[in-house]
């Protein structure tokens, strides 16, 4: 059975870097998986990725060194069951605000006696390069559970949440956290607002105290370097969609030619313009 290198690195106190996948595309997942990230989280909370596409994205990543992970839409048992059976090595659970919600996530993630995950499926064993029997025997010790703390209630209850046995890592979502604190939408992920900094550092310190790997979403490589220096381990570097759109936008702005809008062109010219 393939070892979950992400879980081992985090347990050893090492950083582990990945990114988010928001495009419902096995081809995009395959390309990104060969770059060198430790893990890739397919976002099924804020993207149109369905369960069939998710399984195909995981299959496309199979020959890489990137662990296939997923952010589920919500903390409910059926979401855990389906994505784990599809081959996820780890799950990121959004908006965990209480100890009860953390316990519910652990129960859905682990097989008996550590939880109540249902036995079934087939692609989970294939994803980890083993038989079903070996998968059932080792899954509780290999799968990575990451709880998102992205609301001020979660920050206030961090001690209760992160002391739950079976939680491997936490992941701070600065945007939602800032919004829940009344700071507005679209706050920079590395904001220096003292209120946000204090909240983020409180979660980090609480996680470390309970032996849970602290994580956070970062804007770019400089943000990842900053967070690692601050003691964070599970760090996401933006998303493939941000780099796709951002890279194209940046280079497009550097072009020296002046583009005419389609309404300014004759019909024949407009048809030719879309080729460039």
Image (spheres, helix red, strand yellow):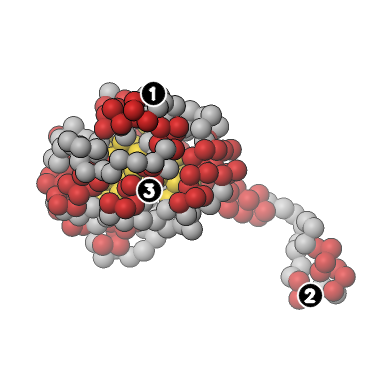
The x, y position of residue 8, in whole percent, is: 31, 25
Nearer-the-camera pick, 237 or 77: 77
Is 273 positioned to the left or the right of 158 in the image?
right
Q: Which residue lies at the image location 24% right of the left edge and 38% below the top edge?
A: 111
Disc 3 marks which residue? 82
Choose top left, top right, bottom left or bottom right for residue 88. top left
Residue at point 40% right, 32% down?
A: 125
Between marks 2 and 1 in the image, the one whose residue lies nearer the viewer: 1
Cβ atoms under marks 3 and 2 closer than 8 Å: no
Q: What residue lies at 28% left-to-right and 54% top-to-bottom?
A: 76
Q: Nearer the viewer, mark 3 or mark 2?
A: 3
User: What residue appears at the point 48 percent right and 44 percent down from the top-left corner?
Assistant: 55
Q: Nearer the viewer, residue 267 or 47?
A: 47
Q: Helix or strand or loop: what does disc 3 sit on?
A: helix
Residue 105 appears left or right of 86: left
Q: Which residue is mark 1?
A: 1
- For the residues labelled 3 and 2, the Cα–Cα distance comes to 51 Å
Labelled disc at residue 264: 2
Q: Label 2: few (<14), some or many (≥20) within 10 Å?
A: few
Residue in the foreground of this view, choosing between 258 and 156:
156
Q: Quadrant of the C terminus?
A: bottom right
Q: Is residue 33 left or right of residue 234?
A: right
Label 2 – label 1 distance at C-alpha: 61 Å
Q: Residue 152, position in %: x, y?
A: 21, 57
Location of residue 90 in the rendering, given as x and y in whole percent from the top left corner: 35, 39
């Amino acid at each position: 059975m393939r070892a979950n290198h992400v879980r081992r690195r985090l347990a050893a106190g090492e950083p582990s870097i990945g990114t988010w996948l928001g495009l419902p595309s096995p081809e995009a997942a395959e390309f990104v998986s060969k770059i060198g990230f430790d893990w890739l989280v397919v976002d099924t909370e804020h993207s149109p990725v369905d369960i069939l596409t998710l399984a195909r994205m995981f299959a496309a990543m199979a020959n890489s060194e990137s662990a296939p992970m997923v952010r589920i839409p919500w903390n409910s048992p059926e979401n855990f069951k389906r994505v784990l059976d599809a081959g996820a090595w780890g799950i990121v659970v959004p908006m965990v605000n209480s100890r009860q919600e953390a316990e519910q996530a652990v129960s859905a993630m682990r097989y008996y006696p550590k939880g109540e995950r249902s036995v079934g499926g087939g692609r989970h064993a294939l994803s980890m390069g083993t038989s079903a029997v070996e998968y059932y025997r080792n899954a509780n010790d290999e799968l990575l559970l990451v709880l998102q703390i992205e609301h001020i209630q979660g920050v206030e209850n961090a001690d209760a949440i992160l002391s739950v046995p079976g939680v491997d890592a936490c992941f701070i979502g600065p945007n939602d956290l800032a919004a829940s604190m009344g700071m507005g939408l679209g706050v920079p992920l590395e904001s220096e607002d003292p209120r946000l900094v204090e909240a983020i550092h409180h979660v980090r310190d609480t996680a470390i105290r309970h032996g849970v790997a602290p994580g956070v979403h970062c804007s770019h490589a400089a943000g990842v370097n900053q967070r690692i220096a601050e003691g964070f381990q599970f760090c996401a570097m933006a998303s493939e969609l941000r780099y796709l759109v951002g890279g194209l936008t940046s280079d497009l702005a550097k072009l020296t030619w002046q583009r005419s809008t389609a309404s300014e062109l004759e019909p024949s010219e407009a048809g030719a313009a879309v080729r460039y």
